[in-house]
Amino acid sequence: MKFSVVIVLKQDNPYMRETLAALEHVNHSDFEILVLPDASFTLDGRARVIPTGTIGPAAKRDIALSHTRGEVIAFLDDDTFPERAWLTNAEKYFDDVRVAAIGGPAVTPPTDTVLQKASGFVYASLLGGGNYAYRYVPQTQRDVDDYPTCNLMVRRAVLEQVGGFDTAFWPGEDTKLCLDITHKLGMKIVYAPDVIVNHHRRPLFAGHLRQVRNYARHRGYFAKRFPETSMRVSYFLPTLLLLGLWIGATLALAFPELRAGYATIIALYALAVSASAWFACKSLALTILTALGIIATHLVYGIWFVRGLLAARLREELSPSF
């Protein structure tokens, strides 16, 4: 089986060079590499550079499709790098003709900084990543209906059948693609725990929370736009938590007899967050950072999910770009 590895980005950067270096050691004999930046630059090795101009990631991936020769298109972000057996492990899943796509875990590399690792542990923790922690650490194989393009492989024929990506969204173009695959075509997307890439995280707190804000706004908007895969209780939980904390604080201020109960609830929440952080990272220093990151993630996600839910349109629907 021939794979086409597609990497979209704005411009040349050290992380992308790390991606290409890792691809040189992938133990599969039949794959090509396409790199799609805004403007051209020179690369050594097998990678082909296809400049696209200033357009969004979804549009870049659609352009890539017309240049690929593989049966399966393997999408990577430019801040990821695959394990050696990435493509070899992936190939067996496509033996099942019902499988349209597979997604594998994007783990935090050991070379990341402490603040980047803490961000990764937030996502991998029970109270941070929740039901979706399997995207960040290998877990049990399962069928899924939504998976990010940082480590997503799709049959070329399926991409052509659904008309590629919806270029109006970023992030979220992968959610729409997966919705088309599973609900329009009725085909399977499989979570493949042994198809692993390393994914550099955005450090706590500013970079991580900007990413959380974008995820939350889009998921809130998608909850009403694409309810088939986004109208789920788990996505509403941070907002419900925030609402509960606000109502509880208001009542505790108004009724002194409720203050002890409210303080107990806060203490139990902090204890649960700390336990979740500890089980994720098993390090005291990282537990403190991760616990604070989980709390901040809950608050930011809760607020921006509502903003997305109330939005009439997202701005990239009018002008999609990075």
Image (tube, rainbow, N blue to C red):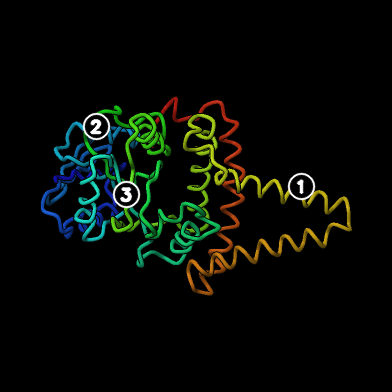
Q: x, y (%) of residue 174?
A: 37, 38
Nearest to N terminus: mark 2 or mark 3: 2
Q: Earlier in the sequence, mark 3 or mark 1?
A: 3
Local crowd size for mark 2, using a 10 Å CA cut-off: few (<14), some (14–19), many (≥20)? some
Residue for point 69% across, 64% down: 268
For disc 2, the marked residue is: 63
Distance from Cα at disc 2 to Cα at disc 3: 19 Å
Query: Between tags 1 and 2, which lies in front?
Result: 1
Quarter of the figure with residue 88: bottom left
Alpha-carbon distance for marks 3 and 1? 40 Å
Task: Give the residue type at disc 3.
Answer: Asn
**Could you say which disc has been placed on residue 51 in the image?**
none
Residue pointed to by mark 3: 151
Select label 2 or label 3 by which is in front: 3
Label 1 or label 2, whichever comes before in sequence order = 2
Image check: 275 left or right of 115? Answer: right
In the rendered structure, are the residues bearing label 3 and label 1 in contact, judged by CB atoms less than 8 Å apart?
no
Given residues 212 and 197, the one toward you in this image is 197
Query: Residue 210, percent across and down?
Result: 50, 47
Quadrant for residue 261, please give it. Answer: bottom right
Crowd band around label 1 with a 10 angstrom C-alpha radius: few (<14), some (14–19), many (20+): few
User: In 3D space, how far apart are the residues under numbered discs 1 and 2 (Cα atoms)?
Assistant: 49 Å
Q: Residue at x 27, y 44 (%)?
A: 153
**Mark 1: secondary structure:** helix
Instruction: Look at the image and tell me in which quarter the C terminus lies.
Output: top left
Give the farthest residue toward the bottom.
284
Could you tell me the amino acid type at mark 1? Ile
Q: Which residue is mark 1?
A: 247
